[in-house]
Amino acid sequence: MGLDSKFFDGIRTRRRRPPEPEPADPTCQWDGCEKQGVHRAPVGRNAEGQFFLFCFEHVKEYNKGYNYFSGLSDNEIARYQKEAITGHRPTWTVGVNKAARNSPLHSDIRSGASSRFRDPFGFVAEGRGKGPRFETQAPKLKSLEAKAFGTMSLAANATPKEIKSRYKELVKKHHPDANGGDRGSEERFREVVQAYQLLKQNGFC
């Protein structure tokens, strides 16, 4: 294929155009100013992304009097600031969105209906004030504390009132004066007093 072939002319690359000269810096948009406007200044509310172009002196002057909330009342400003926390996006109650709140199932739970909602463990009942869902468990005791409860023949979850009542009962029963100086009763009396003092010091009564 010769250099003068029509096919050769068809595949010849195009000659690059010379780069266009870059536009000169725009003029300052301040009335009567002929300087270059190289500094951007926001146009204002509802015109985000749009800017004026000013020279250095006039952009400073413009920024001094710029107020994004110009023309808004105090209530409108407060509302805008509150919505800005979430990026001006709608929010819902934690755990329940609008669609779920209006559903029949959510209405049944709020009204206490059990036809469509089973609550075998009593989680919802507890929220409505129908008592705790778990029984009170006995506290974990140290060896001396457990021995003291055993001495007084009490369960580990006994209340302070029950402990005091049992103490009075045992003291009256095993007091040496009530048993004619019996040595066995005297020893038992001493054990009861020591057990009660231990429980009292550890905050059980």
Image: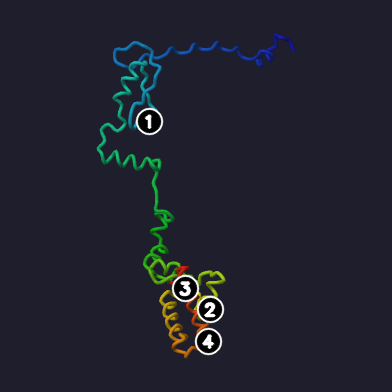
Q: Which residue is mark 1?
A: 48
Q: Residue at x 50, y 79 (%)?
A: 190
Q: CA distance from mark 1 to mark 3?
A: 77 Å
Q: Mark 4 or mark 3: name the one nearer the start of the chain.
A: 4
Q: Mark 2 or mark 1: name the one nearer the start of the chain.
A: 1
Q: Which residue is mark 2?
A: 150
Q: Amino acid at mark 3?
A: Gln
Q: Which residue is mark 4?
A: 183
Within 10 Å of the Cα at label 2, are there few (<14), some (14-19), or many (20+) other Cα atoms? some
Within 10 Å of the Cα at label 4, are there few (<14), some (14-19), or many (20+) other Cα atoms? few
For the residue labelled by badge 2, is the local secondary structure a helix, a strand or a loop? helix
Is there CB contact under 8 Å for labels 2 and 3? no
Q: Residue at x 38, y 30 (%)?
A: 48
- Residue 77 in picture, x, y percent from top left: 29, 38
Kindly give the residue lying farthest to the bottom in the view shown. Answer: 180
For the residue labelled by badge 4, is the local secondary structure a helix, a strand or a loop? helix
- Residue 179 in picture, x, y percent from top left: 47, 90
